Image: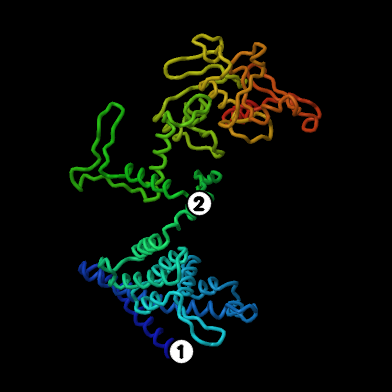
Amino acid sequence: MNGTNRIIRDLESRLGAVASEVFAEGALRSATDDDVLAVMDAAAAVIRRAEALVTEAAGEVQARSASSARAERMTTRYGCRHTRELIQRVTRTSGRTSGDYARAGAATATRRALTGDTLPAPYPALRAAVAAGAIGVDAVTAVSATLDAADISAEQRAAAETELAASARGEGADENGLPTADDLRLQAQVWAMYLDPDGAEPRADAAERHRGLVLGACRDGRVPIRGELLPEVAAQLTRLDHAINNPRARVTFRDNTELESEPESEEDAPVDSRTRPQKLHDAFATALNVAARSSEVPTIGGAAPTLLVSVRHEDLASGHGVAHLDGIDEPVPLSVARRIACSGSVQHVVFDRAGRIARIEIPDRVFDRAGRIARIEIPDRVFDHHQRRAITLRDGGCIIPGCDVPAAWCEIHHVHEAATGGPTSTDNGVLLCWHHHRTLDSGGWSVRMRRGVPEVRGPGWWDPGGTWRRVAKSPTRTLDRYIAART
């Protein structure tokens, strides 16, 4: 093998000299378009040849690390936990790429039987295509992983592999030229569905079980999102993305005027500096805003699931301070509150210095405590959505200390029971979660209203002194209390 290593090192040195010359002199800047593409094509061919050698070596590493005795494994002798780590350290690639090398090596490497005989590779046609430089490691993993997942016989798998390897050389039945790795993946999926028509059902069942979406904690003004979407959900999001980010889309404004976003000429086209992920994020945000205004979405407290933003009036007037979004722990800039207010209706909730809800203002009405045009107090036993929003801004969530149930999941409790004449008023309603609402009489907690501000007294184990305490989990009310205490 010394001769092989010497030849490869010589090729690497000569290629390095060419690359250094091109980079130093900027030769490609003066090259024709055809020459630029020719250099790219030739370099990609070299990469595929090099990947063939890396893949073969990766398969050999796995074969030498398959011993049941840990001390005899190649990975152990070189101080690595597994073959992927050894491949990654030698090739200096990412964990994902080294994993692809390992999978491609397992698919295309020949094997040794216990008798010492050489057995063919699991995918001999792909092995030949790799050796010929027709495909790289990404195409090998795309095809082999798809066929491995299909519930088909060995004969069916061999037939599909043979056709796919021929397609990789441009000799397939469809005569569509040289396919990319993504093209081969799609072709492999078509073969798998044809040979295993029932295979989609088990995969769909597994997908249903593993679907999910998780929102992380807000950090540095961003909320991480992770999860797995069902194909139809991802497809719908993709279609919405295409519709919203289509440069030829027609935008309709509230006055029914339209704007054709397609420019008259390329010179007039606005520059969209957003990245592809940013465009998808904005399309997702648009879809959520439209859904929140839809009459088909379940309501919260009798109203659409409106985003609640709280900000101190003094901060808004001075332009200094922060705003708070219901359900998000981290504060946001005041510009966020202004932007949200610009795109939707605004309901002002005015608190007095003690924290009592003094007035609710919405665009067409003002409701006060005395009941003039009164919706602060209504004759019904069910709090309306204007009252709920105001109480949410005051309480911030379930008012029982230590309970972290958010406001959107809470119920509004009549402190003075409606059955005994208690009014449906913001001065008589507090947020309680389902559990604390139903165990208020037996759990040791007591709630009262003092001048429109809720107070809580805990059980003996929590507060032996039985002190009535004002509670407010609303960040703006907490800040008001902090400022009041310091002045």
Mark 2 belongs to which amino acid? Asp
Crowding at dot 2, Cα within 10 Å, few <14 / some 14-19 / many 20+, comes out as few
Tell me the residue at 63%/77% (across/down).
Answer: 68
**Extreme-left residue of the structure:** 264
Alpha carbon distance from label 1 to label 2: 50 Å
Dividing the picture into quarters, in which one does residue 445 lie?
A: top right
Residue at the spot x=51%, y=22% of the render? 385
Badge 2 is on which residue? 205
Q: Nearer the viewer, residue 92 or 57?
A: 57
- Mark 1, residue position: 1
Q: Is there CB contact under 8 Å for labels 1 and 2?
A: no
Observer able to see residue 412: yes
The answer to whether residue 307 is above or below residue 128 is above
Image height check: is 455 above or below 26?
above
| Front position in the image: 107 or 114 | 114
Residue 146 as seen in the image, left or right of residue 352? left
Identity, as a three-letter code, of the amino acid under mark 1: Met
